[in-house]
Image: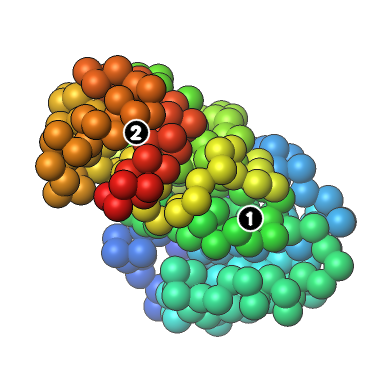
């Protein structure tokens, strides 16, 4: 099998298959041999798991996952990669490559078909430009996934794992905390990739909750409220929500007061439960 963390090998494979890296796909291949084993170890993968990988690239993480998991299904959007992967994963019989856009894929059906009787985890080196949409799809669809271990841009990792109400928190932090228990595990330097990105990366793990952290009657409205509050986080929550949801400020202030909150409260001071109470009041009052 080719050494997929060897730069000369990677270049030879790319040349053989006339493969040129596309910035539009966020392709940065891992060349530090210690990174992928560390990711898989952190994910807790063993033979009881089926693993969904997103964006396998040339298969360096895929091979590490296949060595520990019962089965790996890798979703790849770049139609140029399957022939290359056929060579790099030759002899690995528990990997299936699915060509398609993960954001348009019926993941529930895919998981049911490919992983019957197995625990399910997601593990990936995610394209940085679509990190949040992918993670929110995985979480909001309430898929039968135990945990999600992914490498993302360090700044995104800090937001995704920030505790609600902390300095780094934002709308995405609240969404993740509602569905999972997040942790930032370790950072990965630019030199660990080919080509080297301009930013430091980090690996995070999200342990998916059996039920959301707070009971919300209408989830779509709840997260619309959270996003509105953080669109203008320097303003009070009342002003930001009023502008974001196009509601009269008096109506929002009345709802904040009815929820037992300070009318002058700022978005970052609100907890998951506070947003739930506020959303319930707004729903009751038709807003």
Among numbered discs 2 and 1, the one appearing first in the sequence: 1
Residue at x 51%, y 63% (from the top left corner): 55
Please name whichever residue, 254 or 176, is drawn nearer the observer in this view of the structure. Answer: 254
Please name whichever residue, 90 or 144, is drawn nearer the observer in this view of the structure. Answer: 144
Please name whichever residue, 80 or 240, is drawn nearer the observer in this view of the structure. Answer: 240
Please name whichever residue, 272 or 95, is drawn nearer the observer in this view of the structure. Answer: 272
Residue 43, given in percent of the width and then of the height, sits at 70, 43
Query: Could you tell me which quadrant the N terminus lies in?
Result: bottom right
Relative height, residue 114 to residue 46 (above, below): below
Residue 263, given in percent of the width and then of the height, sits at 24, 21
Residue at x 70%, y 47% (from the top left corner): 210
Q: Which residue is mark 2?
A: 170
Judge from the rendering whether residue 136 lies leftward or rightward of residue 129; answer left or right.
right
Q: Which mark is residue 122?
A: 1
Q: Is residue 138 visible?
A: yes
Relative height, residue 265 to residue 141 (above, below): above
| Crowding at mark 2 (Cα within 10 Å: few <14, some 14-19, many 20+) | many
Q: Is residue 127 visible?
A: no
Q: Which mark is residue 49?
A: none
């Amino acid at each position: 099998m080719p050494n997929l963390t060897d730069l000369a090998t990677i270049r030879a494979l790319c040349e053989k298959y006339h493969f040129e890296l596309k910035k539009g796909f966020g392709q940065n291949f891992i060349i530090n041999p210690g990174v992928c084993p560390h990711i898989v170890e952190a994910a807790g993968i063993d033979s009881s798991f089926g693993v969904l990988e997103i964006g396998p690239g040339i298969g360096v993480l895929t091979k590490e996952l296949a060595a520990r998991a019962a089965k790996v299904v890798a979703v790849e959007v770049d139609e140029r990669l399957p022939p290359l992967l056929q060579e790099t994963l030759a002899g690995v019989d528990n990997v299936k490559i699915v060509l398609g856009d993960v954001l348009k894929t019926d993941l529930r059906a895919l998981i049911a078909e490919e992983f019957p009787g197995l625990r399910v985890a997601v593990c990936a080196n995610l394209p940085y430009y679509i990190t949040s949409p992918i993670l929110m799809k995985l979480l909001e669809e309430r898929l039968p996934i135990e945990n999600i271990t992914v490498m993302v841009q360090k700044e995104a990792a800090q937001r995704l794992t920030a505790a609600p109400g902390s300095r780094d928190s934002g709308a995405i932090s609240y969404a993740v905390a509602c569905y999972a228990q997040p942790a930032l595990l370790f950072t990965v330097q630019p030199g660990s990739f080919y080509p080297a990105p301009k930013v430091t990366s980090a690996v995070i793990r999200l342990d998916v909750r059996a039920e959301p952290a707070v009971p919300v009657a209408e989830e779509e409205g709840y997260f619309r409220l959270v996003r509105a509050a953080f669109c203008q986080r320097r303003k009070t929550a009342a002003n930001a929500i009023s502008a974001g949801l196009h509601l009269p400020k008096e109506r929002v202030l009345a709802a904040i007061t009815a929820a037992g909150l300070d009318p002058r409260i700022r978005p970052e001071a609100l907890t998951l439960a506070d947003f739930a109470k506020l959303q319930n009041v707004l729903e009751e009052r038709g807003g």
